[in-house]
Image (cartoon, helix red, strand yellow):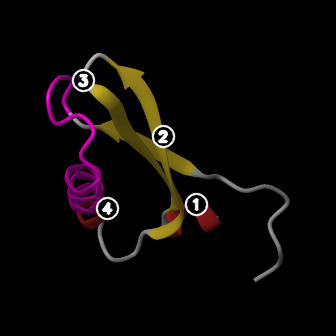
Amino acid sequence: MDNPTHWTVRHFSQANPAGPGCDSVPALLRRLADAIEALGPAAEIQDVVIQSEMTEHGPWRSGTVYFHLPEDED
């Protein structure tokens, strides 16, 4: 296969529910892992980024997953 002249990178973001517990990194990682598994085994995960925003309940965690699917190679 020739090198592509461009790349398509898909992404999605998820966050813990607002309020108490919004700072739970394990809960966020479980949420992201479930979503990644739902993409199927053919999805190639490129990167996972965890962000944090301060709220009255502490840091509100969210994550963004960047990925490719087999049809993106066309």
Cα separation between marks 2 and 4: 17 Å
Cα separation between marks 3 and 2: 15 Å
Q: Is mark 2 on a helix, strand or loop?
A: strand
Mark 3 crowdedness (10 Å alpha carbons): few <14, some 14-19, many ≥20: few
Mark sitting on residue 57: 3
Q: Which residue is drawn at 65% across and 52% down?
A: 8
Mark 2 crowdedness (10 Å alpha carbons): few <14, some 14-19, many ≥20: few
Q: What element carries label 3?
A: loop
The amino acid beneath tag 3 is His
Q: What element carries label 1?
A: helix
Does 21 appear in magenta?
yes
- Seen as rendered, the residue at the extreme top is 56
- Seen as rendered, the residue at the extreme bottom is 1
Q: Which residue is drawn at 29% across and 69% down?
A: 40
Mark sitting on residue 54: none
Cα separation between marks 2 and 1: 27 Å
Give the label, 1 or 3, closer to the camera.
Answer: 3
Q: Where is residue 38 in the image (x, y as percent from the top left)?
A: 23, 61
Report which residue position mark 1 lands on: 72
Cα separation between marks 4 and 3: 27 Å
Asked if disc 4 and disc 1 are in contact, CB closer than 8 Å, the reply is: no
Asked if disc 1 and disc 3 are in contact, CB closer than 8 Å, the reply is: no
Q: Where is residue 15 in the image (x, y as percent from the top left)?
A: 30, 36
Q: Nearer the viewer, residue 51 or 55?
A: 55
Asked if disc 4 and disc 3 are in contact, CB closer than 8 Å, the reply is: no
The amino acid beneath tag 4 is Ile
Q: Which of 21 and 10 is in front in this view?
A: 21
- Seen as rendered, the residue at the extreme left is 20
Report which residue position mark 2 lands on: 51
Q: Residue at x 48, y 64 (%)?
A: 69
